[in-house]
Structure formats: C-alpha cells, structure tokens
Image (cartoon, grey):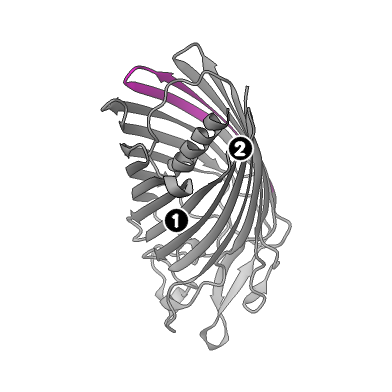
Amino acid sequence: MAKKCRQNAALIALTTSALALPGINVKAEGAPDYTSVKYRYTSYAEDKAPEKYTVEGDLERYEIQANQIQLIQPIGERAAITLDYLSETMSGASPWGVKQGADNQPELIMSGASIEENRQDIGARLKIYDQESSISFMGGYSRENDYKATYGGLDNELHFNQKNTTVKLGLRFSLDTINPTQQEGQSRVSEEEKNSASYNLGVTQVLSQTAIIQAGLEYVQLSGYLTDPYKLQDSRPDVRKQTVVSFGYRQFIKPTDSALHLDYRSYTDDWEVSSHTVNIAWYQNFGDRHVIAPSIRLYNQQKAKFYGVYYDENSATEYFSSDYRLSSYQAMSYKLKYIKYFDTWSFTVAGERYESAGSQAGGSLDEIENPGLVSFTRWTVGFDIKI
C-alpha cells in the first residue's frame, strides 16, 4: 500500500496544475471507474484603497466568499458526467474613476461600501472516451444581481504515439446580458448584450517517465457592450480580439521526490493590451502522503491604446477608460499549497498574496501609477473524495 501511495504522489507532483494553461491537458487517461467529489471554500480580500489618493467613497474594497463543489460520475465504461456548482457573495467598494488633482496628482473616486452581490453558477460536462480520442460537451448558466450568462463548449482530444502525444481542440461561447444597478446621480444603461467565442488548440507531449512539455494557442473574440457601466467617463470599442500563447514544462526529480513546474503565457489584443506571465512552482513530496507546493507568479502588462489615468475633456477621443485593469502595471504573487492524502480522500489548503504596482515611474500622464491598482490576499481550503 505504501508503494502505491508513493507512486500516486509522484504522479500528482508531476501533473498537478497542468490544466492551468489554455487548451492543455496531461497525458491521456481513460474514463474514471469511481465517483469523485471535490469541494473548495475560498476567502478573498482586497487591500484598502489608498487613503492618500481617495477623495470620494469608501476605502474598504471587495471581499468575496466562494463555495465550489464538483461531482464526477462514471456512466458505463466509456463516459462520465461532471457537475459543477459555484456560489459566491461579494461586498465592498470598487474604483469608479480617477480625476486630476493638485500638482497633477491623481485622485481616486470609489463607490460606497453598500455593494452586495451574489452569484450562482451551475455547469455540466459529458465526456465520452474512445481508444484513441475523447469528446466533451459542456454548458452552464451563471446569474448574479446585474449579470446573466449562458455558456457552452466542445472539446475534442486526439491521442497518438501510444497516448504519449495528445492534441486538444476546443470551442467555447457565452451569451451574456448586463443589467446594471441604477444609482441616483449616475447615468447607466438599463440592459445590454455581450457575446464571446473562443477557440483553442493544445498539444501535450510526454518526453519521458519524468517529463512533460505542453503548448497552447487560444483566440477569443468579444463583441457587444464591452464598456464598464460602473466606471466614470468609460467608453470602449464593441469588439475585442484576444490571442494567448502558452508553454509549460513539468519535470519530476527522483532524488528529491519532487517536481518543477514552469509556465509562460503571452497575451495580446487589438486594444493594444499586451502582457507576459511567468509562473514557477515546486511540488515537494514528504513521505507517502504529504505535498507542499510553493510558487511565484510574475506579471507585466502594457496599457490599452485608449487608457488614460484620468479623463481630459479637452483632448477626449471616441474611446476612453481610466480602469486600472487596462493600465500599464506589474504584479507579483506568492502562493503556498499543502496537500494531505488519505486512503480515499485528500485535504488541500492554500494561501496566496498578490501585489501590483505601476510599471512606469516617469512623470507624464501616461506614466502615473493608477491609484486603483489592486493587491489582495486569498485563502482556499477543500477536499477531494473518491467513492
């Protein structure tokens, strides 16, 4: 029994988080022969808005509590159905915009702290397995106070070279309806539509018993109402085309009974936003049933072509946004995960700290750090059960 546990831990150290890249899968597996249940509770808390720059609204930013549960049920010997449910509550204030203050300093306008939202999301996936391929059909529905989304998708996996090579093709779509909460003194749309479609291609190659390499390509097109109705002087194009290229490498290291995970992601879009992400993780086995996984993530982004730290009506163009998410900035996050394995179930706990800052340090308007940039702390706890 101890030998089997150690083999499982080594495999998990090699493949855990392999699905973090778009269109990427680990070495092909057959249909599951047992029922599994997974549960996660997540607590997310943003740091307060900077008191130095905040001139309106509340300093307390978003806090989110989320519960997720997943059930995977085999159907015969060649199929399985997956059911996902998410419930989350969100409260706190969010940035509305930035205006010019004295000495060219940005002044942050926050909403009040009365924002309280609930979101429910339910999804299902049917996966059918064959000798050298598998196909998945998925769909779901998400609803919150001011937003509804109906989504679906299709995945097709093809296995070659004794299942050491996997090619995955995927399609996703979402049909969304936006009903912004109205507020006195603010001019907001009453109802708008937004649609999205994404196409992805992924290749996974098993190099040896201890190494896997991965590559992914994804194209996403958003259309419809892409402006944020809760931002001031916010106007964005009604089409956004996004491209993501990603690479991953997994190496199991026998002498230390551990695994190194390296991931890289490049993002570009026709709003001229571009970003690079590097993630490095180390999965360390201790004994037969314990895994500790520290990781670090580095992120750098260049701003959208119509981004400005604050609105200037004298030089206004058709599109404008002071949304910090469209600014130039860099971010770093640190994460530590612990997994404890039992005979038929496992326990997971993880903590993450994320910090962001402007990536430019000059004095021009385009180089002023957006005071709305977010930093946060997130905790996750959960379990996986095999029945």
Q: Quadrant of residue 359?
A: bottom left
Residue 143, numbered circle = 2
Label 2 to label 1: alpha-carbon separation: 34 Å
Residue 362 placed where, x, y %? 42, 82
Choose the circle earlier in sequence order: 2 or 1: 2
How packed mark 1 is, by other alpha carbons closer than 10 Å (few <14, some 14-19, many 20 or more), is some
Q: Is residue 121 magenta?
A: yes
Residue at (46, 75) in percent of width and height: 312
Residue at (50, 21) in percent of width and height: 32
Q: Which residues are magenta?
A: 117-140
Q: Is residue 62 above or below residue 1?
A: below
Residue 284 placed where, x, y %? 52, 49
Residue 384 visible? The answer is no
Q: Nearer the viewer, mark 2 or mark 1?
A: 1
**Location of mark 1 (residue):** 280
Residue at (63, 29) in percent of width and height: 343
Q: Is residue 66 above or below residue 264?
A: above
